[in-house]
Image (tube, helix red, strand yellow):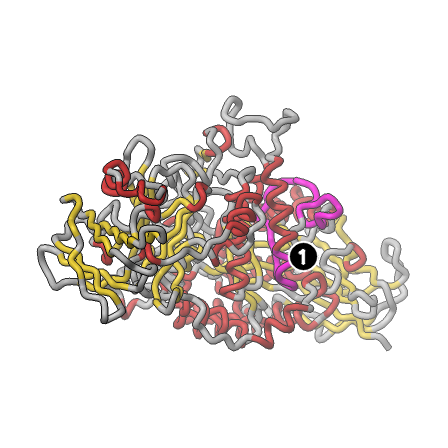
Amino acid sequence: MDDFKIFTKDNVSKIINFEDINPFHILGPHYNKYTRELYINCYFPNSVEVRVKPYDKSKSEVKMKKINKAGFYQVLYENEDGEFNYKLIVKYPEGYPLEKEDPYAFSRSITDFDLYLMGEGNHFRTYEKYGAKVRIKDGVKGVEFTVWAPNAKAVCVVGDFNYWTTGSYPLENVNGSGVWALFIPELDEGEVYKFALKSWDNHIFMKSDPYAFYTELRPKTGSVVRNIDNYKWNDSNWLEKRQNWNFLSQPISIYEVHLGSWKKDYNNIGFPNEWGFKSYVQLAYELVDYVKKTGYTLIELLPVMEHPLDQSWGYQVLNYYAPTSRYGTPEDFMFFVDYCHQNDIGVILDWVPAHFPSDPHGIAYFDDTQIYAYQSWKKGYHMEWGTFVFDYGRNEVINFLISNALFWFDKYHVDGLRVDAVASMLYLDYSRKDGEWEPNIYGGRENLEAIEFLKKLNVIVHEYYKGVLMIAEESTAFGGVTLPVYLGGLGFDMKWNMGWMHDFLEYFSLDPIYRKYHHNKITFSLWYAFSENFILPVSHDEVVYGKKSLFEKMPGDKFQKFANLRMFFTLMFGHPGKKLNFMGNDIGQYNEWNSESSVDWFVLDYETHGKLNHCVRDLNIIYKNYRALHEQDFRSEGFEWIDFSDADNSVIAFMRRSADWKQILIFTFNLTPVVRDNYLFGVPHPGFYSEIFNSDALEYGGSGLGNSGGVNSEPTRRFLRDHSIRAKLPPLAANIFLFEQY
């Protein structure tokens, strides 16, 4: 008879006051086999009448007794042989009676084993359990809601289906685990909902679903029920090839894109598209066409995860499992990725596990306590960014983040994640003054928990998905970022070379007359070029906030700016390391990037900008077609200096070799506006060196000076080489020579 303690006034009051952690003990059907009594209890706030309508037509419809004016009802069936299926007919003061299945007559899906894995931090498919999932139970379709809120007093789900009434449809705290769940029958895709939580000081507040697959368009903040398993993919050939893809020896030229400002749809501005955003589908066709034409191999997207503020560019993520609704639906974004793959273009997403914003509807203080962030402000708050730091020592947070990484590979077929702000994760004193940070247990500045998290992340990702890329945006000299975990490293595939980027941009911004005093800026990077697997980025951060566009960073008049820019790109493609270029750089955009407007595509109406774009396209083609430029990007055997000592004339030259050393390319650079005739370079072999690229060519907007197709070597010793070539070096130009074996 213990089951029937549920009928005490105290238990009823817990339901009405939104305080019960296990409403199944009270609500729904309850059968006593000894007395053959079946009680059915329900709670519908603001209702005036509820009736039970059995599926068995031999049983009559019964009006329930209203136990409490707040909306708690009960009915007793005597002499029953067990529970039976029924519906509840709920009448409100206005409107027609509503027929509803009873949520408390259905079981939940989450298992004890799920809870065990979540508790130990090894449930890497939590997105299959948490959130709002369309399911069929006992032949009835509905939505199961599951959320982690270990310190909440009570949790319910609210939406149009219950008139956003807090306390209605309370969830069960499963086995006291802090995981709350409830299946609500007859709901379907498209329902807008939130979780309402009650704290132990009786504060009630609403939160978006951390695992929502779709959200309302900002500024609305509701989560939207979405089944994302119905899209029909057409990229099986791509995924099969990716399994065996070896990035180490492959050409990787990445086009970095902010979808909201790549191109605008100015013909369709108006609510809700007041910013003129193009859709994922529009962008798929137009962006892929441009990327293929210009020769890039992958697209990297600034974060597409849902974020509240356009001006954050996506780096303040609120809904980690939802592609932003600014550009369309989840299926639209799937089409974007699918279309890229069908055109042999990979997709990398920027991913932000370093911090999250403080917006009240997000995961900050989710159950009125910081369950996702460190408790101490010295570890858990970024004062510079006004954001919170994930607690990398908490298993449930590790589940959330690693599952999220796998989610984008699983559900959206992406090819890589570029992990943002890794340095801020590695160091406890990152951007903090003395007294604003706590040392680790050994007294050091490294965040040992974050380091272990990153190692685990990279091991799990590569275990589950072969051929995908994990890329670190890490701006310090932290050792072993791209070293395998089993050798003591963090396990990333590649790392952004921030030192290269800053040195080269600083050098190229100098008037050529001063470059000889800063010659080391373009040679120093080779001292450490092979210490990690580097990507050479010219990223969005370098062309915004008063830093000028890449074109405007270049010194001199307009002709010299274009010449410098062509030379910069040639040096970038010749330098060891994979490549990344932000949108607008490759067309010589005058204005620095503005996330609220489009790339200045109108500049392509001018011949010089079109020729610059042609130059970048040809460099991409050369980079992909010549093995010497990508087979040994991360090995010193693939690079050798020819001349790095002529600072007075600002001339450098080097060679790139294929893995079998049978293909040799010679790069020469004249970093001043002075033409240099018969400049002597030592070469490794006698023979003819054909000029396969000249950044000063007329078709690129240059002066047309060059070497008439190539040069023959001569037996003249230069430095340690017995043979040399004499080349004409055009002003502010780069030349590429291919050794032709006889």
> Relative to 4, is 697 above or below?
below
User: Who's the residue at 46% across and 35% down the image?
Assistant: 382
Where is residue 78? Give x, y as percent.
25, 56
Label 1 is placed on what type of residue?
Answer: Gly
Q: Residues within 10 Å of mark 1 (few under 14, many from 20)?
A: many
**Viewer-proximal residue among 611 and 458:** 458
User: Who's the residue at 61% across and 44% down the image?
Assistant: 514
- Farthest top residue? 435
**Viewer-proximal residue among 491 and 701:** 491
In the displayed structure image, the side of residue 86 where residue 152 appears, left or right: right
Where is residue 579? Give x, y as percent.
61, 59
User: Who's the residue at 88% across and 54% down the image?
Assistant: 720
Q: Which residue is mark 1?
A: 577
**Viewer-proximal residue among 83 and 711:** 83
Q: Which residues are magenta?
A: 461-490
Magenta stretch mostly in which secondary structure? loop
Does residue 605 show up magenta in the picture? no
In the displayed structure image, the side of residue 247 where residue 350 appears, left or right: left
Where is residue 371? Give x, y as percent.
45, 38
Where is residue 240? Give x, y as percent.
63, 73
Disc 1 secondary structure class: loop
- Farthest left residue? 94
Does residue 484 show up magenta in the picture? yes
Quadrant location of the C terminus in the rendered image: bottom right
User: Who's the residue at 42% across and 63% down the image?
Assistant: 262
How many labels, in total? 1
In the displayed structure image, the side of residue 531 where residue 45 appears, left or right: left
Quadrant location of the N terminus in the rendered image: top left
